[in-house]
Image (cartoon, grey):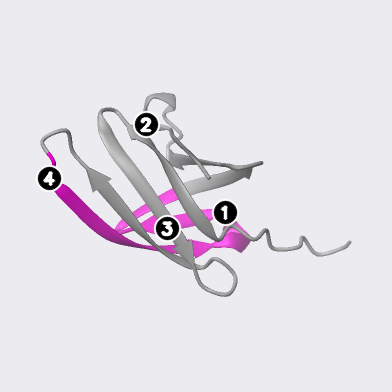
Amino acid sequence: TPEAQPTNIDGTYTGQDERDRITLVVTGTTGTTGTWTQVETDGEQEIKQVSFDAANQRMIIGDDVNIYAINGNQMIIDDMDREASDRIVLSK
């Protein structure tokens, strides 16, 4: 069976998580690391390091393990129990 080719996910993704504004910047030669910036409505900012495990479709945001999928220019992020209400969709 042919091995899945890694998808180049480098770039800047933006979106919303409830009312917080999210910016995810993915860098690294294979899009393996990044920075997650969450800006709350009051302007307070939280920045977390992100790492990707592309083989298992996992991304670690700070200490939280999430499942991610790439669909065109969108990154769909679910928590491990795949609660629909917790889904975050970011666009490039």
- Image disc number at residue 57: 1
Mark 2, residue position? 86
Dot 2: what SS? Answer: helix
Q: Amino acid at mark 3?
A: Val
Mark 4, residue position? 44
Dot 1: what SS? Answer: loop
- In 3D space, how far apart are the residues under numbered discs 3 and 2 (Cα atoms)? 20 Å
Name the mark nearer the viewer: 4 or 1.
Answer: 4
Nearest to N terminus: mark 4 or mark 1: 4
Q: Amino acid at mark 4?
A: Glu
Name the mark nearer the viewer: 1 or 3.
Answer: 3
Mark 3, residue position? 25
Is 76 in front, or is 44? 44
Dot 4: what SS? Answer: loop
Residue 2, x across and y down, in percent: 87, 63
- In 3D space, how far apart are the residues under numbered discs 2 and 4 (Cα atoms)? 21 Å
Q: Residue furthest bottom?
A: 29
Nearest to N terminus: mark 3 or mark 4: 3
Q: What range is drawn magenta here?
A: 43-66
Name the mark nearer the viewer: 2 or 4.
Answer: 4
Dot 3: what SS? Answer: strand
- In 3D space, how far apart are the residues under numbered discs 2 and 1 (Cα atoms)? 17 Å
Is 14 in front, or is 3? 14
Q: Are marks 4 and 1 in contact (CB under 8 Å)?
A: no
**Residue drawn at x 55%, y 66% as measured from the top left:** 31
- In 3D space, how far apart are the residues under numbered discs 4 and 1 (Cα atoms)? 30 Å
Q: Is residue 70 left or right of residue 76?
A: right
Nearest to N terminus: mark 2 or mark 4: 4
